[in-house]
Image (cartoon, helix red, strand yellow):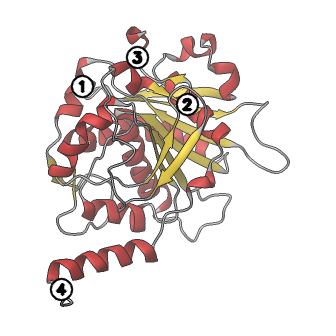
Amino acid sequence: MPRTTTTPTAASAAAALLLLSHLLLPLPAADAFTEAALHRLAQASSLSYLPLDKIPSSEYYPTCRLEPVAQAVDPSSESGATIFRSSREGGAKGGERGKLVVACRGSANPKNFGTNLKFNLVPADRLSQDSMPDNALVHEGFQTASLGLWKELSRPLLDHVLECDEVIFTGHSLGAATALLCATHYNASFRGSQSSSSSSTNPPPPSVVSFGGPKLCNAILARHLRNIALEGCTILDVVHSRDPILANNEKLWDERGFERVGIEVECDPHRPVVRASREFGTSSSSPFGNFAWNVLDHCKYMGVFVGPRALL
C-alpha cells in the first residue's frame, strides 16, 4: 500500500507551538498537596458558606485545624470569602509563621446564581494586571464578582498576610472561580511591586486549590495566568466524574472556547482520596465520561458537603 504523508498546516504548527509553550512553562506538580491537606481545604471551603459565629459549631471545624479571623462580602454581587489562620494544633512549628487560607464561598443566593449565568467571554481588563495579551477573555460574571470581592477582601487580608509563610486561595463552584481571580489580584496588588523586598515584608506567593470549579477563560488568558500572572504558583482543580455541573457544562464550555487554567485532580466524592491528575491541554474525555444527574453530587468532595446548608 502506498505510504501517505501529511503536509503540516499553519494550524498544526500553531498547535505544536502551543504544546511546546506548555512544556516549557509547566505548573508545579499536583503532588504539592497531600490528600489530608486537600481534605482540610475542602472543609474550609464548606465552612465559608457559614457566618463566622456558626463556624465553630460545624462538624468540620475541629478537623480542618483552621481558625476563622475575618469575612468579606461584595455588596454588589454578594460573593463572599472567609479568611482562616492555622490553628494552634495544625499551625506553625519552629520558626514558621503559619498558613493563611482564603476560602471563597460558592453560590448561596439569587445574585450568586445570576453571576454564574453571565458567562459571555469579555476582555480581561479588570484583573489588576499592568498588561494583558491581546484577545485575553474571561467569564463576565466571575470577573465582576472577583473585582468586587477583592476590594472588600484586600484590607482584612493585608492585616494578616505578613504574619504567614503560606497563602492558599480555595473555594467551591463559583467560589473556585473567584478564588483563582482573587489570587490573581493578590499577586498583582500585594506582590507585583515588591519582588525585590525582603521575605519579611514581601507577602508569600499564593497557591490555588479549587473544588468543582468551572472553566472561566479562553486559552490566551489561561496561558497568561499560568505562565505570567501566577507564574510558579500551584493551581489545582479538584473534580470528580459524578459532578453534574461539570459533566453537563463541559461541552458548552468547549464550544464557547473556555479552557481550564490548572491541573485537574480527580477525587472520590465520598472519601478523602485522590485518584488521578490531568494537566491542561490533554484529552477531556475523562473524567467526565459517566452520566451525572444528582445536583447534590456537585456539593460532595472528598467526603465533605461543600455547599449551602439549605440543600441538606
The residue depicted at 35 percent of the width and 62 percent of the height is 281
Using the numbered discs, state the Cα–Cα distance from disc 4 to disc 2 in whole angstroms. Answer: 46 Å
Q: Nearer the viewer, mark 3 or mark 2?
A: 2
**Which secondary structure, mark 3?**
loop
Q: For residue 308, which numbered disc appears in the image? A: 3
Q: Is residue 81 above or below residue 169?
A: above
Percent position of residue 277, x then y: 50, 52
In the rendered image, the quadrant that contains the C terminus is top left
Using the numbered discs, state the Cα–Cα distance from disc 3 to disc 2 in whole angstroms. Answer: 17 Å
- Please give the residue where the numbered disc 2 appears in the rendered image: 302
Q: Are marks 1 and 2 in contact (CB under 8 Å)?
A: no
Q: How many marks?
A: 4
Q: Quadrant of residue 125?
A: bottom left
Q: Nearer the viewer, mark 4 or mark 1?
A: 4
Q: Are marks 3 and 2 in contact (CB under 8 Å)?
A: no
Amino acid of disc 3: Pro
Residue 236 left/right relative to 247: right
Q: Crowdedness of circle 3 by 10 Å Cα count: few (<14), some, many (20+)? A: some
Q: Crowdedness of circle 1 by 10 Å Cα count: few (<14), some, many (20+)? A: some
**Which secondary structure, mark 1?**
helix
Residue 139 appears in view = no
- Please give the residue where the numbered disc 4 appears in the rendered image: 6
Percent position of residue 96, x then y: 77, 49
The residue depicted at 54 percent of the width and 25 percent of the height is 270
| First reached walking from the N terminus: tag 1 or tag 2 | 1
